[in-house]
Image (cartoon, helix red, strand yellow):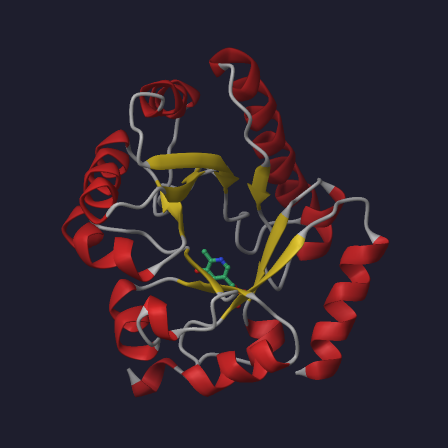
């Protein structure tokens, strides 16, 4: 793991974008997270609320500089559980969900960090906003919600897409971010894009956060679940 992490940080440093590395630890035990933490990683991503709940200690019992983001689809009925467990929800894909997160965050007295997920590949099986108008409406409405803070956008590149298709998806997310900043008069710093298979392309497209799982932790064994 040490060598892979060093190599990843080197690639990031050599690239044009000052991206952060998110270690995606889903389907790996907490010991793997501790190992990465010992090696200097501070930003982690998980995709299921249930798994976070059973795997991680409560927030107050984690190292205070460990930052955990939820990156998987969040159902409205899991919002209450999710909000106290994470530092950011990067997969918000509707205004309704954002409102529910705002409500729960107000209840427990926190301001939740948010990324809005956009479906850049147009794949109907994928989650995320699917039109500019819907994401714009959400950004505008969010200004009335005082317990959420929208920091930027997230996307999953077209899986199995050609390099050109992946690049096109990432560039379209960047364009959308720029357009939203203008149209909504808001700063959207973060562009979370790039996974084990396409992070190099994402870095070339000015990703600010690459989400790498398999390359760091190895293949996921789903048979145990
Ligand atoms: C699992 C996952 C990743 C990491 O994928 P790898 O291919 O293992 O690097 C990144 N983003 C999301 C949203 C994921 O669910």
Residue at (57% x, 66% y) in the render: 42
Residue nearest the viewer, comparing 119 with 188: 188
Q: Point out residue 220 in the picture as x, y percentages from the top left corner.
A: 46, 79
Residue at (27% x, 51% y) in the render: 74
Residue at (37% x, 62% y) in the render: 47
Q: Which quarter shows the C terminus?
A: bottom left
Q: Which quarter shows the N terminus?
A: bottom right
Q: Is residue 111 left or right of residue 82?
A: right
Q: Point out residue 95 in the picture as x, y percentages from the top left corner.
A: 27, 30
- In the displayed orientation, state which residue is furthest to the left: 77
Q: Is residue 196 left or right of residue 27?
A: right
Q: Is residue 160 left or right of residue 162?
A: left
Residue nearest the viewer, comparing 58 with 99: 58
**Vertical relation: 60 (above or below) 18:** below
Residue nearest the viewer, comparing 122 with 38: 38
Q: Point out residue 93 in the picture as x, y percentages from the top left corner.
A: 33, 38
């Amino acid at each position: 793991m040490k060598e892979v992490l060093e190599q990843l940080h080197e690639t990031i440093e050599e690239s044009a974008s000052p991206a952060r590395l998110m270690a995606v630890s889903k389907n790996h035990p907490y010991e793997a997270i501790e190992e990465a933490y010992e090696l200097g990683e501070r930003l982690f991503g998980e995709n299921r609320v249930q798994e976070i709940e059973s795997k991680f200690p409560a927030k107050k019992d984690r190292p205070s500089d460990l930052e955990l983001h939820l990156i998987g689809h969040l159902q409205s009925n899991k919002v209450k559980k999710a909000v106290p467990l994470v530092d950011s929800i990067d997969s918000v894909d509707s205004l309704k969900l954002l409102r529910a997160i705002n409500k729960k965050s107000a209840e427990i007295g926190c301001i939740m960090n948010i990324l809005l997920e956009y479906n850049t590949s147009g794949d109907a099986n994928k989650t995320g906003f699917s039109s500019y108008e819907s994401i714009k409406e959400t950004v505008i409405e969010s200004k009335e919600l005082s317990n959420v803070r929208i920091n930027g956008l997230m996307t999953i590149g077209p899986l199995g897409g050609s390099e050109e298709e992946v690049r096109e998806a990432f560039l379209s997310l960047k364009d959308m971010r720029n357009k939203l900043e203008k149209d909504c008069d808001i700063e959207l710093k973060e562009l979370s894009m790039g996974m084990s298979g396409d992070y190099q392309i994402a870095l070339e497209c000015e990703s600010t956060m690459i989400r790498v799982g398999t390359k760091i932790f190895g293949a996921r064994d789903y048979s145990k679940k």
